[in-house]
């Protein structure tokens, strides 16, 4: 049995999310594909191979962040594509252009993200005389 190419839906291309750190000596630039109906997890590196911070995953080496800090996902309605971010109820918060998303213990509503936005994962935390810094990135989106 053969498929009719006109009736086979073409796979949708991912949204390419680039997160450029404002302090490049701390964290790598990341370019991350987000496919429709999938989520991209952003979180803290916890010492396992699956969470090693790399350019092509959402993990950062920042003790100020939660293990499951926030998610990104895209929606597609015809030609209208959008990218959203949602904080997962983190202790130290996710900030979009200076505004905290959600509250501690309560996930935020999904919020649209646009190219040029500034996102801060967590805020700086001082524990036992050690300063753990947030992760601040600028957003670029390729649809």
Image: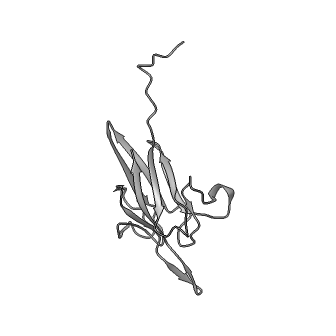
Please determine whether, in this image, residue 66 is positioned above or below residue 78: below
Residue 105 found in image quarter: bottom left
Quadrant in the rendering for residue 119: bottom left
Write the residue at 32% across / 36% down.
78
Q: Residue furthest top?
A: 1
Q: 1 or 135: which is nearer to us?
A: 135
Q: Nearer the viewer, residue 97 or 138?
A: 138
Q: Quadrant of the N terminus?
A: top right
Left/right of residue 124 with respect to residue 54 in the rendered view: left
Q: Is residue 68 above or below residue 77?
A: below
Q: Is residue 98 above or below residue 138?
A: below
Image position of 38 (left or right of 112): right
At 44% across and 38% down in the image, what residue appears? 13
In the image, 38: left or right of 60?
left
Name which residue lies at 53% across and 73% down: 64
- Residue closest to the far front: 25
- Residue sitting nearer the eye, 12 or 115: 115
Residue 121: x and y in percent read: 47, 67
x and y, in percent, of residue 47 in the image: 67, 64
Q: Position of residue 107 (x, y in %)?
A: 42, 62
């Amino acid at each position: 049995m053969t498929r009719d190419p006109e009736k086979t839906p073409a796979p949708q291309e991912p949204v390419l999310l680039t997160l450029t750190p404002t302090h490049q000596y701390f964290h790598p630039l990341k370019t991350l594909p987000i496919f429709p109906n999938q989520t991209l997890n952003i979180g803290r590196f916890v010492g396992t191979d699956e969470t090693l911070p790399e350019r092509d995953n959402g993990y950062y080496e920042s003790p100020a962040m939660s293990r499951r800090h926030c998610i990104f996902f895209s929606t597609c309605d015809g030609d209208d594509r959008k990218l959203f971010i949602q904080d997962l109820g983190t202790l130290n918060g996710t900030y979009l252009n200076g505004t905290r998303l959600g509250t501690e213990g309560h996930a935020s509503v999904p919020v649209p993200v646009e190219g040029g936005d500034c996102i801060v994962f967590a805020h700086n935390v001082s524990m036992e005389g050690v300063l753990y810094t947030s992760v601040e990135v600028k957003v670029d989106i390729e649809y």
